[in-house]
Image (cartoon, helix red, strand yellow):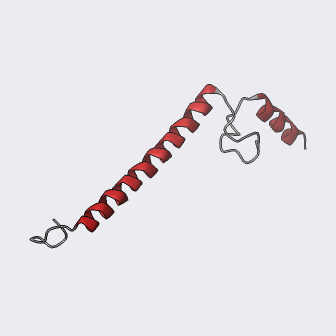
Amino acid sequence: MNKYSGQIQSRRALFAGVFRYATLGLLGAAGGWGFAKRRRLVREGKCVGRGICRGCEVFKECGLPQALSAKQILESK
């Protein structure tokens, strides 16, 4: 049924609704997958910032050699 009770939903409206919710589902699944992957990489101690330490959100807690080197350089300035 459509917005108006008593009217039968057209085929076009049915396909548009299916497409809309399938797209939203895929976007949600892709976002969740990316978030989970990032958390897993951080937990495993792998760089998530592609080697750009100063702009990384986990820079303060990072213990990777490149981040430690960047921290040491920043402290010496």
Indicate the quadrant where residue 11 lies: bottom left
- At horizontal 21% and vertical 68% (from top left) the residue drawn is 10
Quadrant containing the C terminus in the rendered view: top right
Q: From this viewpoint, which residue is outermost toward the right?
A: 77
In the image, taking residue 75 as reference, residue 59 lies left or right, namely left
Q: Where is residue 27? Give x, y as percent.
A: 45, 51
Q: Where is residue 60? Give x, y as percent.
A: 70, 39
Indicate the quadrant where residue 44 lies: top right
Q: Where is residue 49? Give x, y as percent.
A: 70, 41
Q: Nearer the viewer, residue 29 or 65?
A: 29
Give the vertical position of 18 relative to 3 (above or below): above
Indicate the quadrant where residue 7 lies: bottom left
Q: Nearer the viewer, residue 55 or 12?
A: 12
- At horizontal 66% and vertical 38% (from top left) the residue drawn is 48
Q: From this viewpoint, which residue is outermost toward the front?
A: 11
Give the vertical position of 7 relative to 44 (above or below): below
Give the vertical position of 74 relative to 13 (above or below): above
Q: From this viewpoint, which residue is outermost toward the top?
A: 44
